[in-house]
Image (cartoon, rainbow, N blue to C red):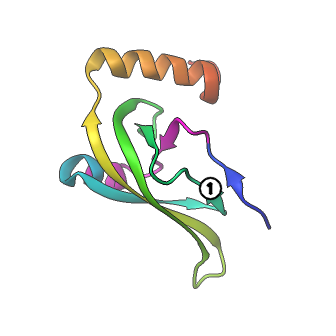
């Protein structure tokens, strides 16, 4: 058992629904498997499940716990700072592939 640190500039959604709620309502949350440390108060880039940069968000809370099924999970709450422009999204996505995700197909 241990904590895994996330990259400070990456907040990748696994669920389109969680991302939709953030973009639609300005606040949202996502659930990640395992205990993870997200930098509360820091601004980060949010990515779609397809690794597309879409917005700048601020991490409001990060709660690591063991759920009722006995799984280690981390809930991350965030607020939308602003969506990225098309050009910003293209550049951030390219940089993320080079730095975090690996080569782009």
Indicate whether 9 appears above or below 87.
Answer: below
Quarter location, residue 82: top left
Q: Identify the residue shown where x is 38% and y is 47%.
A: 58
Task: Identify the image quadrant of the C terminus.
Answer: top right
Q: Which residues are magenta?
A: 7-20
Residue 79 at x, y percent in the picture: 31, 51
Residue 42 at x, y percent in the picture: 46, 45
**Membership of 16 in magenta stretch:** yes
Indicate whether 102 appears above or below 81.
Answer: above
Task: Identify the image quadrant of the N terminus.
Answer: bottom right
Indicate whether 98 appears above or below 39.
Answer: above
Q: Identify the residue shown where x is 19% and y is 50%.
A: 24
Give left or right: position of 98 versus 20. Answer: right
Q: Nearer the viewer, residue 50 or 80?
A: 80
Residue assigned mark 1: 37
Q: Nearer the viewer, residue 39 or 47?
A: 39
Quarter location, residue 50: top left
Q: Identify the residue shown where x is 53% and y is 18%.
A: 95
Q: Identify the residue shown where x is 52% and y is 38%.
A: 10
Label 1 CA crowd tier, 10 Å (few <14, some 14–19, many 20+): some
Query: In the orientation shown, which residue stands out farthest toward the right?
Result: 1
Query: In the orientation shown, which residue stands out farthest toward the left?
Result: 24
Give left or right: position of 79 versus 6. Answer: left
* Local secondary structure at mark 1: strand
Indicate whether 9 appears above or below 27.
Answer: above
Query: In the orientation shown, which residue stands out farthest toward the bottom?
Result: 68
Residue 66 at x, y percent in the picture: 63, 78
Q: How many marks?
A: 1
């Amino acid at each position: 058992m241990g904590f895994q640190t996330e990259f400070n500039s990456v907040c990748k959604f696994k669920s389109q629904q969680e991302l939709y709620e953030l973009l639609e309502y300005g606040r949202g949350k996502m659930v990640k498997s395992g205990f993870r440390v997200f930098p509360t108060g820091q601004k980060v880039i949010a990515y779609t499940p397809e690794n597309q940069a879409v917005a700048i968000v601020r991490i409001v809370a990060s709660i690591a716990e063991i759920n009722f099924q006995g799984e280690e999970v981390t809930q991350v709450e965030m607020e939308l700072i602003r969506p990225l422009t098309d050009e910003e999204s293209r550049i951030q996505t390219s940089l993320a592939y080079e730095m975090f995700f690996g080569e782009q197909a």
